[in-house]
Amino acid sequence: MTQEIIIAGFGGQGVLSMGKIMAYSGVMQDMEVSWMPSYGPEMRGGTANVTVILSNERISSPILQTFDTAIILNQQSMDKFEEKIKPGGTLIYDSNGIFNLPTRKDINIYHIPAAKEAGKIGNIKTFNMIVLGGFLKIFPIVEMDNVIKGLKKSLPERHHKLIPMNEEAIKRGLGVVETIQTV
Amino acid sequence: MAELRIEDIIKPENIVFKKTKLFTDKPLSYCPGCGHGVVHRLVLEVIEEMGIEAETIGIAPVGCSVLAYEFMNIDMVQAPHGRAPALATGIKRIHTEKFVFTYQGDGDLAAIGTAETIHACNRGENIAIIFINNGIYGMTGGQMAPTTLPGMQSSTSPYGRDVETMGHPMKITELVSNLPGTRFVARHAVHTPALVRKTKKAIRKAFENQKENKGLSFVEVVSNCNSGWKMSPVESNKWLAENMLPFYELGTLKDE
Amino acid sequence: MGELRLMKGNEAIAEGFIRAGVDAYYGYPITPQSEVMEYLMLEQPEKKTGMVVLQAESELAAINMVYGAACTGKKAVTSSSSPGISLMQEGFSYIAGSEVPAVVLNVARGGPGLGDIQPAQSDYFQSVKGGGHGDYRQIVLAPSSVQEMYDFVSIAFDLAYKYRIMVLILSDGAIGQMMEKVVLGDQIPRMTNQEIKDKYDSWAITGRTPGREHNVITSLDLDQENLERHNHHLQAKYREIVEKEVVFEEYAIEDAEYLMIAYGTSARICHKAVQLGREKGIKVGLFRPITLWPFPDKRIKELSNQVKGILSVEMSAGQMIEDIMLAVESKIKVEHFGRYGGVVHSPEEVVIALETKIIGG
């Protein structure tokens, strides 16, 4: 099993940290992982993206052109990455801030209303964990226990009090993800 | 009258002056009349008197004193041009118990190595910087230095230093005395016996300060360059007193 | 099994510096490697092992601080990225001339000039041919994973002390910035002053021990006959390194008809490209130099008897290809492929290049 994932959105949406938690969850499950971010000034308020690979084998290239799954959180990223999903692959998006919905017919498409749900929770910072929950619903490749362990590992000690809230957000995500189309 | 034999003269009780123990046997390569030899001797006398030759690491610059390690019988490294304070920092930070000093000329310390000088001073590295200012690049054949006086001729200011186009002589000693990291900053000279004694005291203090972890000690010695200035040694010392010292005033700038 | 962590390459190598018993890190911030010093400052190794970490005023100062520390027999290290490494070349030349052991990390980025901050492999010439003045060499190790960023620290110091030479770890922004699993080894204690005296008293400037001559570290010798002799000595040392220290890795070589040669990040991309190529029925293998100097030219020459063509893949306009061409002596086709200026080629692009430049070309 190898999952090659791109997560793309605005800087500040928690794209990189979601990827990090995903990667750490994989480590906890004894998988091979890589986390390759876009970096530099463009991160400060601009677009941010990270390639996460989870695999049971040695990971070859950490830098990819096409992906099994794209998690897309803004319009620019939709424009850039929809076409880079492998046929039969998966697109997960939040329609908040996306005007042109995906058009591909040869991929699985899911919608996760994460921004809306984070608003309900009353903490926008849980946004990325809701998205992660949606991903885990579609691809239960990492057990929830290991996700929580990954969360603990990737958060500094002083933020550990936030873990229950994040866990709650992941569970919300599991519940609210909607299937748009499957192939 | 009995014949006077040489053996009767060379006796310990007749010795009035001898080579400092920490000089190697290598003849000094400096021009006769140059102040470098005197300052070398003072540094070595201080190290010998303090009994710290096994704990001292010296750093030679690029310039006339590039070969200082040939004459000083202590462990030394030769630094790239201007970088001596960086090497000293690198050494002292992991050898806090050692005595570390740099020996640098004006081009090395105040032109190409300005950044290293100022930042080592500003960090208050616990080292001694011995700075020889003779207002000229001696080794490369008498070019203009950052410390060359206004109007002073050199091979790259053959009509005299024009401060309008060539900049002003830099009083880097005053500059570093303003930095909080320096503890002892002084300017001395070695063209008279009395001044030699004062200079030695300052160098001693610079080494003593290290022992007490006081921070950076900076001792400038205004010196001559009779070859570069194209004068006899005597003339050059006179010129130094009349021209260099009014601009580079002697004394202690800072002692905390 | 050691401690397992998920780390960036820059963090892993910083932890590697601590655990390898390094005495001093002197550095200056530059993207994409600033995490190295940030990690060290946060970890405060001074409290754990006594390792000193200092932010210098420039790369020039940093490499000269390393030079000073290395002259005393201590393990000293610095890190930078391409423009900063250019500034350090003066120090590299002095370190080579005066034969002190030191380790430097380059997390390379796109150039020339200020370039950009994205990964690149365009510092190959500077690294293996010598960017400073004089006839000198430095050992160049090219990690291609976060684990190797960590592992190569100890290897680099072993080589540095064995030959009293500078070892450059040539990485790039991708390896510096990406996170992978790393298994960390045990803490190696720092050498004590007494150990350094015992081992290196013949050259290290640790203070003149009573009874021995003063030690002097210099790259200056104004007598040209002496300097030529010194250069002969250096060249003999370099020949010994070429003889003994070549390291490389091979993948899918046994039945290969075509070969990709790549190092570092490019080798990872080519690993995938080999898989994609083989899915298409192309018998292609990967040869990965781990030491870029000494270059594994003997093995490449051997392989040139087996394969029909070689694609040199590098995130540059084509630098390593010159060493490959020297190794194969024009017997078979050798072509370069690579995106550069901070653009990283994809595995798919590499396969297309293999098909068009080597197989179909």
Image: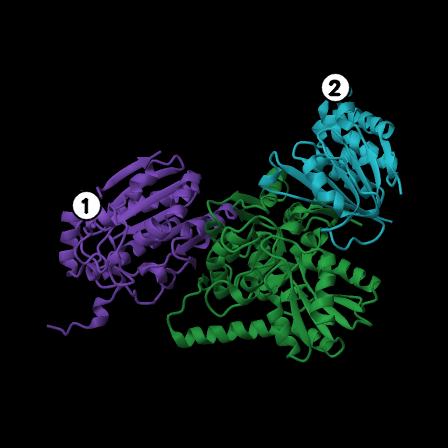
Nearest to viewer (mark 2 / mark 1): 2
Residue C305 falls left or right of residue B163: right
Q: Picture coordinates of residue C6 (x, y %)? A: 74, 43
Residue C226 figure quarter: bottom left
The amino acid beneath tag 2 is Gly
* Mark 2 neighbour class, 10 Å CA radius: few under 14, some 14 to 19, many 20 or more: few
Secondary structure at badge 2 equals loop
Check the rendered structure and report the hue given to chain B.
purple
Residue C52 figure quarter: top right
Q: Nearer the viewer, residue B8 or B146?
A: B146
User: Are both tags, 2 and 1, on one chain?
Assistant: no
Badge 1: chain ID? B
| Image mark for residue C245 | none
**Colour-to-chain, cyan:** A
The amino acid beneath tag 1 is Leu
Q: Which residue is mark 2?
A: A122
Residue depicted at x 48% and y 58% = C91
Residue depicted at x 61% and y 76% = C326
Residue A172 figure quarter: top right
Residue A135 falls left or right of residue B199: right
Q: Picture coordinates of residue A113 (x, y %)? A: 79, 28
Secondary structure at badge 1 equals helix
Observer able to see residue A122: yes
Q: Which residue is mark 1?
A: B245
**Colour-to-chain, green:** C
Q: Picture coordinates of residue B189 (x, y %)? A: 23, 48
Residue depicted at x 46% and y 50% = C61
Quarter of the image for the C terminus of chain A: give it. Answer: top right
Residue B131 falls left or right of residue A17: left
